[in-house]
């Protein structure tokens, strides 16, 4: 088996946090999302991460912080228009690397709290899909939904972003494609390079069984500012997560607060705030804010803002 | 460089025209002679002395500003105001130097001539200036943020009026379907901001949508010494009745009910 992590998206909805870094490399509760994923993959499974030429540097730097060997695959694209598509990238990798094994397919911007080993143990031959109940059909419209059979394991139908979802059980960014499914994948990806979820519809259409691994642990698709804050709140809880190199003086915190390395916070009130590395905050009231690296704020109040790297807001 | 040279030419021409209009007023009043009763050299010296101060007064009205349209009533009012101050300065200077007064009608003529000539020259010069600043490559490549009806109107207006702020690219936070608007390419979402600012050597950025990103756009502009402009419509002000005022020294955008036109003054 080989693991393939899709990490080539440009993540435009998370701009400006993704202006200079890939979404999978965004720190979530003090650790890059991708690190959380890779740590879960059993050591004997070779890991390939697919990204694009623009984001390459960030992945190379991150790779040095990893303890296990990784293969970083660089797609030669520099913008959305040139993208191969997620499934297209998988297809290219299979073809160029002559992959002829089961594939653990993961998306680099999905955080999942379940034990990946348990998922792998659950695989019994057919394609396997990890699914999570988001508890709200309206919310499920943004994802691929999974309709289970009477055995609560076999998938009867898969609907990609349905207008009227029949269930709130959604596909997460974790699946296992057996070696036998690869020819179908290669053919399907040729015509639908962007439609990752579509491969399961295609397998079902051809009569190939697809099974479901349902989990109740945390799952977050970090696609937006709100999703990122929600994930932080769920993982950190009503606590403050602070790096040892951060300096805090007279700081009042409420909700989930994450303080990055070498950040300096003084005389401020923070509620549900994430500060990346090297931020300086003095005499501020911040609520539901994310500050990218080296932001410098003095004497201002902000609510619901995501500030780009090196932003400087100083009230004179 | 192009804009700076043009500005110096403009200032120099304005000075010369101010002195010239006073000289013309002299000859129109005195006749086409050099009077011994009212020596021309004294008159000219005073006009030359006053000209720089008049120019400073004119500059404080921001009439030389890049975004000022010379063909507006407000601009004409500013020029009249500066001309009035010019006449007052002229009278004071002449009296201080020679302790004598002269024809009041001449002063009226000088006021009218300096106003009309300055205004006409400003209109002509702005037309020339705009053409020159738009020569390829345009001096002020401008990035438009947002594909909205407001931004489309803005682009059309800037193009039709040959405004020196020349739209060269558009980015849209939500990803617009249009590929171009009035010949200006829509390059994509805001993730292309940095490369667009770099590649097009943007000098001005006009935000027409994505209000939630104003801080980040402003931050990018500050880091690159780019001038940032925000359309009032983004704040819901669409009726063109806003003013930038000062509240205890703090600049504020003000929208207040106006019953009569003269309320503008009070």
Image: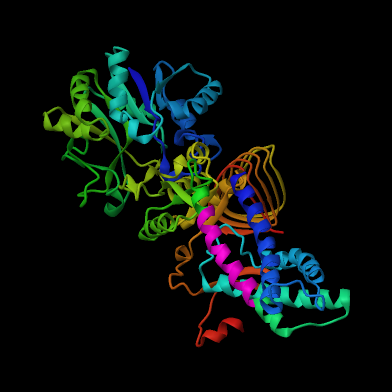
Does the stretch in magenta take in B127? yes
**Which residues fall within the magenta stretch?**
B112-129
Residue A40 image offset from top left, x and y in percent: 44, 27
Q: Which quadrant is the C terminus of chain B positioned in?
A: bottom right
Does the stretch in magenta take in A203? no
* Residue at the (69%, 58%) spot, across then down: A315
Q: What secondary structure do most residues of the magenta stretch adopt?
A: helix
Location of residue A52 with respect to B141 vertically, above or below: above
* Residue at the (51%, 70%) spot, across then down: B72
Q: Is residue A180 left or right of residue A288?
A: left
In front of the other: A51 or B169: B169
Q: Which quadrant is the N terminus of chain B positioned in?
A: top right
Residue A197 image offset from top left, x and y in percent: 25, 35
Q: Is residue A281 left or right of residue B130?
A: right
Residue A35 image offset from top left, x and y in percent: 49, 29
Q: Is residue B112 left or right of residue B35?
A: left
* Residue at the (27%, 33%) spot, across then down: A194
* Residue at the (50%, 87%) spot, across then down: B259
Q: Is residue B237 left or right of residue A190?
A: right
């Amino acid at each position: 088996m080989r693991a393939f992590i899709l990490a080539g998206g440009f993540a435009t909805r998370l701009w400006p946090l993704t202006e200079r870094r890939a979404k999978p490399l965004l720190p979530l509760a003090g650790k890059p999302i991708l690190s959380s994923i890779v740590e879960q993959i059993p050591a004997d499974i070779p890991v390939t991460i697919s990204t694009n030429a623009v984001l390459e540097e960030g992945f190379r730097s991150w790779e040095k912080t990893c303890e296990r060997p990784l293969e970083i695959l660089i797609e030669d694209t520099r913008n959305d228009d040139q993208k191969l598509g997620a499934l297209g990238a998988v297809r290219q990798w299979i073809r160029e690397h002559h992959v002829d094994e089961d594939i653990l397919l993961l998306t680099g911007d999905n955080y999942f709290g379940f034990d990946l080993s348990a998922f792998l143990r659950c695989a019994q031959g057919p394609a396997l899909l990890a699914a999570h109940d988001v508890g709200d059909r309206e919310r499920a419209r943004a994802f691929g939904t999974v309709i289970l059979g009477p055995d609560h394991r076999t998938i009867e139908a898969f609907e990609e972003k349905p207008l009227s979802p029949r269930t709130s059980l959604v596909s997460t960014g974790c699946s296992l494609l057996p070696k036998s499914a690869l020819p179908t994948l290669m053919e399907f990806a040729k015509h639908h390079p962007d439609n990752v979820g579509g491969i399961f519809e295609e397998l079902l259409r051809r009569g190939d069984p697809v099974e479901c691994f349902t989990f109740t642990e945390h799952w977050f698709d970090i696609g937006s500012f709100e999703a990122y804050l929600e994930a932080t709140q769920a993982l950190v809880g009503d606590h403050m997560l602070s790096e040892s190199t951060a300096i805090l003086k007279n700081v009042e915190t409420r909700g989930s607060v994450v303080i990055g390395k070498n950040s300096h916070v003084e005389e401020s009130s923070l509620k549900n705030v994430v500060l990346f590395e090297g931020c300086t905050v003095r005499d501020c009231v911040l609520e539901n804010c994310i500050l990218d690296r080296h932001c410098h704020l003095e004497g201002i109040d902000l609510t619901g803002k995501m500030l780009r790297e090196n932003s400087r807001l100083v009230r004179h | 460089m192009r804009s700076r040279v043009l500005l110096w030419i403009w200032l120099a021409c304005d000075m010369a025209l101010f002195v010239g209009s006073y000289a013309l007023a002299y000859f129109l009043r005195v006749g086409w002679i050099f009077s011994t009763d009212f020596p021309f050299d004294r008159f000219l010296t005073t006009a030359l002395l006053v000209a720089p101060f008049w120019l400073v007064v004119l500059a404080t009205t921001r009439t030389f500003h890049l975004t000022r349209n010379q063909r507006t009533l407000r601009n004409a009012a500013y020029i009249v105001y500066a001309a009035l101050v010019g006449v007052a300065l002229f009278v004071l200077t002449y009296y201080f130097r020679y302790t004598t007064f002269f024809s009041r009608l001449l002063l009226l003529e000088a006021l009218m001539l300096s106003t009309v000539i300055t205004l006409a020259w400003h209109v002509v010069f702005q037309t020339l200036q705009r053409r020159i600043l738009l020569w390829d490559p345009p001096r002020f490549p401008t990035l438009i943020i947002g594909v909205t009806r407001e931004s489309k109107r803005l682009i059309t207006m800037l193009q039709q009026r040959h405004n020196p702020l020349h739209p060269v690219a558009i980015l849209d936070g939500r990803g617009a379907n249009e590929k171009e608007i009035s010949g200006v390419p829509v390059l994509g979402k805001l993730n292309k901001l940095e490369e667009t600012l770099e590649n097009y050597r943007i000098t001005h950025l006009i935000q027409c949508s994505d209000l939630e990103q104003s801080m980040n756009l402003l931050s990018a502009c500050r880091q690159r010494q780019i001038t940032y402009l925000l359309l009032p419509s983004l704040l819901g002000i669409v009726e063109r009745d806003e003013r930038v005022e000062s509240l205890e020294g703090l600049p504020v955008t003000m929208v207040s009910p106006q019953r009569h036109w003269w309320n503008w003054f009070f």
